[in-house]
Image (cartoon, grey):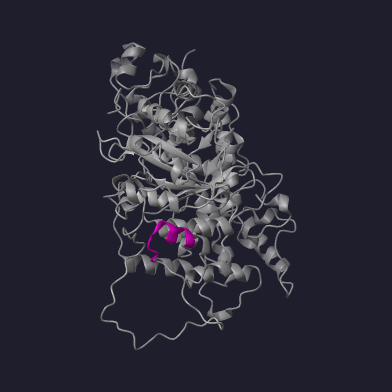
Amino acid sequence: MSAPQASHGTGITSFSAHLGQDTPEARISRGIAPVKPEFLAKSEIKIQVEAVCGVQDKRTSVAAVEKKSRNQLKRERKQERESDRNLCWSFVQGKCSFADACKRSHNLEAYLSNKEAELPGRCPFEATGECKYGLMCRWMSKHQNGTRQNDDGSAQLQIKQANTHTSSNRDVDNTAESAGDGTLPCGTVELPVSHQVDDEFNTLHSDLLVQLRKETYPFTRSTAMLNKLGCRISRKKKSCNKEGKKQKADTDADVSAAQPAKIYDVSRDGTGFDKELPLRQAEKKRVDFREKLYLAPLTTVGNLPFRRICKGLGADVTCGEMAMAVSLLQGSKSEWALLKRHPCEDLFGVQICGGYPDAVSQAAELLEDNISMDFIDVNCGCPIDLVCNKGAGSSLLTRLDRLEAVVRAGSGAVSFKTRKGYHDNSDIAHTFVDKAAGWGAAAMTLHGRTRAQRYTKQADWDYVDRCSQLAAPTGLQLIGNGDIFSYEDYRAHMESASRDIDSSGGLATCMIARGALIKPWIFTEIKEQRTWDISASERFDVIKQFCNAGLEHWGSDTKGVEATRRFLLEWLSFLHRYVPVGLLERLPCKLHWRPPSFVGRSDLETLLASGSCSDWVRISEMLLGPAPPGFQFSPKHRSNAYATVDSTE
């Protein structure tokens, strides 16, 4: 098959001209994906095409961005909140109690005159018969009975006025067609609309928020558990009298002997962590992970719309993004938003992170009593400095007594995720994997890298297999994690563990992380035991489904559209790394293979492989309309990190 002429640059660093003359094995030995020679692109093509198309890379380095002060950011947020582009949500629904004192705009005419152009297609909430975003919806003119009727009957008048403004101010091409044959659409395409829009679970209610903010929530079970473990409880419920008022302080108390309390500290006296504390049978809840495909909890990119995509492609177990235990206890709305669950997630867990047992125990009790979930996963492997400096995440590997206390403190069906060690050449997970079941853990996920390695080394699956043998006699479900990118990888790791399928220990399953971000159809490949040469149009359809799910989750107004755009761009920063199966000379593809600059079998396939931020923005504009003026994007995660060849140490 001859490669089509390049119509767009891939934006990936091209290699030397003699790359196509190397053998596939020689390229693989250097960590380069063995793309067929006829699809290799020359750097001259990339530069020439970008010059013709006028493409400019909008990638912004962190150093190049001007750092704004806290007061400047606060002032900008206030200006945005009070601008005519930010219409009061309560006013739209006809029930704003602040009237003229409201900090948000009530100027409907100014809002409609500045409102962004409507997008083609139908409203994402068409199936519900009513769109709660009303006038702010970017598909407002398509509403039939979609705006709530105000008490004064003004809703229909507002719709009429809005239709007058929006019908005369459209700069979005509504005639663009989907690229079913791999050609690039010439405008914004219509997104698919769900036949049924399901309500999401795990919303933070106002009465619970008040209890958390006032620190009056009763943590009865966690208090008993922490007392049993001998852990100090630093965050205690405020004492209240029968009238609900705070009791008067004792003014005669001796304050000279008062000591400053540490937040979420653990008392080392009388803990008895070296003794096995048997759990009651009621506390030993268990979730069966065996042979189930587990989508890893992924910060930022593992959002609810992405999990819906993976569920539709075959994932069995999903888990929410990592939430900090302390922030949950403080009632942080942004942190509670990470706990939302879609009805399609039939086996769903939430991941919390904390460095002290009282915070983890109280957060676990809080979640068990107030949200819908099947298990709690405690993150003991997060490598980022912001988490480790607080004594949480991977730093727990340097304090095994605290790690044990954190796992024991979690009630209910608790699993925990960790790494093989903190420092290089200092593996430590094998020293406690046979004890984790005694701590009360239902499962343990082991990432075959240390904290120091990050993604610079390949996952050490020999070490994971060794730990699985230690876990098998204890009944612990050990879940392997790291570098799974094909059904061959999954099958090889499961078979190498040599465990009895009927046993409750050993390697129960594998957790899939970056492999799912780059090719979410990996779950379909594993279940069907095949390599899927997915076409560019099929991949584009998956992206369209994500956008529709994002609009249902974040909203169909301008804020929701831009939130969907942002998270789509974060996903594209991983998705572009996929090399189509039909372009490779050797299979299966490995996660650490670095793709050379190549031309796809269609214009759309070439565009989807671009590593340029400006091309990712272009893809988002095909689906969500033009980006705001001056819009720039810089990926949050280092998706361009590749492990070195044949290196696990």
Q: Is residue 339 left or right of residue 423?
A: right
Residue at figure coordinates x 53%, y 32% from the top left: 504
Check the picture and name the quadrant holding the C terminus. Answer: top left
- What x and y, as percent, mark residue 221? 52, 60
Quick one: 306 or 218, which is closer to the camera? 218
Quadrant of the rendered image containing residue 235: bottom left
Compared across the picture, whether 172 is left or right of 569 comes to right
The residue nearer to you, when weighing 469 against 161, is: 469
User: Does 228 lie within the magenta span?
Assistant: yes
Does the stretch in magenta take in 186? no
Tell which of 639 and 471 is nearer to you: 471
Q: Which stretch appears magenta? A: 224-234
Query: Percent position (x, y) of residue 428?
Result: 31, 37
Residue 154, image x, y percentages? 71, 71
Q: So how many labels did they put on this image?
A: 0
- Where is 188 relative to 36, above or below? below
Up the image or down, 489 lies above or below 71; here it is above
Q: Is residue 264 visible?
A: yes
Q: Is residue 178 visible?
A: no
Q: Is residue 270 left or right of residue 168?
A: left
Q: Residue 260 lies in what quarter of the image?
A: bottom left
Q: Is residue 383 left or right of residue 293?
A: left
